[in-house]
Image (spheres, rainbow, N blue to C red):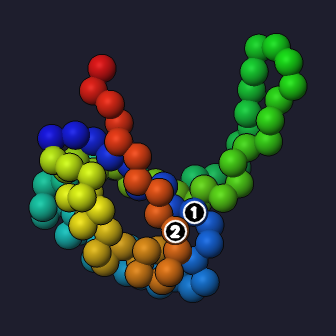
Amino acid sequence: MADYIFFMHDDAPTEDPSAWEAYLFTLRQKGVFEGGSEIGGGICVRKGGGIPDITKRLAGYIRVAAATLDEAKSLLTGNPHFEAGGTVEIRELPQT
């Protein structure tokens, strides 16, 4: 099993906040939920040189366990942000 992160972009036209409880319950029941949260404001820092702006399009994340990228993608079924037409970026977390 690998770990994947779903990054929800801040682009869903409308989203039902009450649907999150049922979706996260489903992920927990499947034993794949590893955590998640909304993402608030922040800053970028660098020891030297210019400092870039933060990535403003990220609104939240969910970490899941899945055998493959396709399996991780299948876990988006019922995700309120995805179901509302929002973008979800899926990234694998390499084992180190």
**Nearer the observer, 23 or 90:** 90
Residue at numbered disc 1: 9
Q: Where is residue 17 in the image (x, y as percent from the top left)?
A: 47, 79
Between disc 2 and disc 1, whose residue precedes? 1
Q: Residue at x 62, y 66 (%)?
A: 10
Q: In this view, does 23 lie to the left or right of 30?
A: right
Is residue 68 shown to the viewer in this render?
Answer: yes
Query: Who's the residue at 24% across and 58% down the image?
Result: 70
Q: Which amino acid, mark 1? A: His
Location of mark 2 (residue): 87
Q: Determine whether label 2 and label 1 are within 8 Å by CB.
A: yes
**Distance of label 2 from label 1 (alpha carbons):** 5 Å
Picture coordinates of residue 51, whole percent (x, y) = 83, 29
- Residue occupying image coordinates x 52% and y 74%: 86
Whether residue 33 is visible:
no
Residue 13 pos. (x, y %): 61, 84
Q: In which quarter of the image is residue 24?
A: bottom left
Instruction: Locate the C terminus by quadrant.
Output: top left
Quadrant for the N terminus in the image = top left
